[in-house]
Amino acid sequence: MRSAAPPYTRIDVEPGLRKIILFEILFPMVLLIVGIAMGFLQVLFRAGIIRSQSFLGIEYYQGLTLHGAINAVVFTTFFAVAFGHALIRFYLGKPLFLGWSWTSLILMTTGTLMAALPMLTGHASVLYTFYPPLKAHPAFYVGLVLLVIGSWIAFFSWIPLYREWRREFPDTKVPLGVIGIFATFIVWFIATVPVAIEIIALLIPWSFGWTATVNVPLARMLFWFFGHPLVYFWLLPAYVMFYTMLPKLSGGKLYSDFAGRFTFLWLVAFSAPIGIHHQYMEPAISTTWKAVHALFTLLVAIPSLVTAFTLAASMEHGARKNGGAGLFGWWRKLPYLDTDRWMFGYLFAGLVLFIPGGITGIINASYNLDTVVHNTSWMPAHFHQTVAGPVFLAFIGGSLMLLTMLTGREVAFKRINVWIPYIWALGILVFSTGLFRGGVLGEPRRTNLGLSYANPSSPLYRADWEFSRVVGAIGGTIMAIAMLLYFIVFFGTLLKKKTSSPSLEFPVSEPYHDEDVASVQNFRPWLVAAVILLIVAYTMPFVELAKGRYEGAPPYDPGSPVAQVR
Amino acid sequence: MIEKRIITAAVVFVLALAGVIALTVKQLGIGLPTCLTDVRPFLEGKVIDQAPKRYEIHYVARMWRFEPAEISIRPGSTADIYLSTADVTHGMQIVGTNVNLMAVPGAVNYARVTFDKAGDYLVVCNEYCGIQHHNMAARIHVTDKVAAVAAPPPAVLAGGRKILEDQGCTACHSLDGGASIGGTFKGLYGRKRELANGTTVIADDAYIRESIEKPDAKIVKGVDPGMPPLPVPPADITAIIEYLKTLQ
């Protein structure tokens, strides 16, 4: 029997690490103001409230690029690294290699600024998926590479600490939070290798004009090899908070320690060999391999179903200890609006959104069912219930939590703060209700509807998409209000007086069932499984692409229908 | 161990779902596009009337229109749709049907669809393809009044007209007076233009030349700026001007 982990207590943080983590929280938070503003403008454009190609000097698709890149790539990557630094320091109890952490921070920040400049000046309006042959300024691609490499360096610097800890405590279970954050970054590494190949080998030489054309089907397959594990990279830090913090915040214990380990490790194995489910509607990939990826995608739903059960059971345990009773009556005894345990709301509201988000995800993955919804507004409805739901709420909650701990300040406007996650969740539910409906009726995503389909004087006007646009705009407005309040609380906290010394102390949930299952104590078998599954899932699709001998495409500026031929 | 039962239940659920999907593919024939390697990309959109109620439609997606832009076919017709792109990645959804295809440079996509109900079907581009993406659409009229309207054969383009097509000008400027993003070319030459800054200008040779080389120099009132400067050789601009004179 492996012994339980040592007790985890409050630790004082080295000033260097404190600065690093605070910068990694504050820098993306400032950018997030832009990202959120752009998101709000999207719903106004789409509803036809702003009926123009641009607003305040920002062109529609430029704003959409900023919204996706900042919110989904920059903010998430910075938070994952900052949270990882803090968790590793807290759970392993060892000082980090700050030289590497600084290197990581400088690379990530430089990369972000390099990519932001062309986006802000309108030279990279290619959306955050940057599908060639639409071409951005080379600095955009180089910046993305630096951001990714910076995040790798942070991850690599944690590995020796993990090994050292395992040598010191050979008979102790690795803390669940450490398993979770390592799973996060293993998935990130698996994901980012193919996209690094896409960018470095195909897009950078092509954007500089060193190569004349790019193989688009190949670039797309490499992108989606990255694109799906990317969403698990987003989701996993939120899962870490759900498993390690939520039960404790509820007043109880984690129902099953095994379920947590199983979930993290299963995602290591299965999050990558499924990328083709984003490419169901494409040529150059045969239906056989689309079907294989569909099956694997359904298998990756298993840990989410397990998580739903485990977390509900954990919250029930907490609620009953708080005095809850009855078959359903215990739901009333959770700290929904507790100003001290405010993080509960950020996690709970996200979980509520994840129910429809997960179900619609299964619909999207279901092979031919995707035909109805592919590239319609159904898709942003779905991923705002997942990425902008549990992930985003956990990340902004986590950012605020790290801010309070590392500055030794209390949360400002506590009574407002506890309502923010619920307002946000309401906004998302309203917004996505509209967009789901529009999607089923064929309304496209990523489209400045106000100039055509939502413009009664355009020949393309569609009255049957009106519900989607109006409800979408109402939901978007509620989301914008929630974020306005959040920024007030976040930056207000910075302005408060220091009341304690900076430290790290996360809520740590004890296990209720502390099972001892050998297969979930070690990454190795799961890493081997991941590699085998990737070989099975991707060898033949790449062979098919090579056999197809698809002709390359020259670069195009998004503003001009004429190829840029040198 | 209850967690193991939960995992088992989850596995059974997803496998059952996979089984249902497999049934819809096998029994109902609802499939996905597959890999076509025997059809090379094409640049000419057309409708081929193969037999009564059997059509083959070749769609070319380009910034920012579909060719053919408008077609009419009879109710109950089955169409084999081939999709190619002339430039970037596009999407093509025929709203109200199961046709939802990506147009990927280098490859040809394919779907078969039967139009049971009469009506006007909107064809939308549903993948971002540049700043005028929201205006990229086409129509399919499913109607009994098809007098062999298998789309007119593409006109043999020459001179200025061909340059306008090749440079992509017609993506935003119609030739027939129809509504378009940048305003129509019909009747443009020699007309008085009211500018956004309140002044007016006559659309003469110098104005047209400047508008091609420096599009933002003079913005017509009510038109969004944003046209890219186009690298058109001077001789070609002369040909364009000569052609515009004929469009009265």
Image: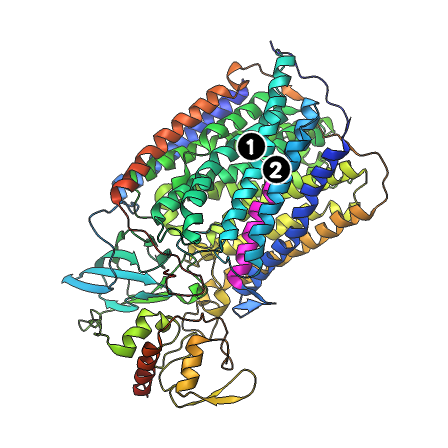
Q: Amino acid at mark 2?
A: Ala
- Extreme left residue here? B51
Q: Nearer the viewer, residue A214 or A469?
A: A214
**Residue named by callout 2:** A80
Q: Secondary structure at mark 1?
A: helix
Residue A45 has which mark? none
**Residue named by callout 1:** A184
Residue A269: % across, % down: 46, 28
Mark earlier in primary sequence (1, 2): 2
- Disc 2 crowd rating (10 Å Cα; few below 14, some 14-19, many 20+) is many
Residue A521: % across, % down: 55, 18
Q: Amino acid at mark 1?
A: Thr
Q: Nearer the viewer, residue B86 or A6?
A: B86
At horizontal 77% and vertical 26% (from top left) the residue drawn is A10
At horizontal 47% and vertical 24% (from top left) the residue drawn is A527
For the residues tagged 1 and 2, is the chain the same? yes
At horizontal 55% and vertical 43% (from top left) the residue drawn is A146
| Residue A64 belongs to magenta span | yes
Residue B185: % across, % down: 37, 81
Task: Tell me if residue B99 can be seen.
Answer: yes
Residue B177: % across, % down: 36, 82
Q: Is residue B30 above or below residue A507?
A: below
Q: Secondary structure at mark 2?
A: helix
Task: Tell me if residue A169 can be seen.
Answer: no
| Residue B145 belongs to magenta span | no
- Disc 1 crowd rating (10 Å Cα; few below 14, some 14-19, many 20+) is many
Quadrant for residue B246, please give it: bottom left
Question: Chain under label 1?
Answer: A
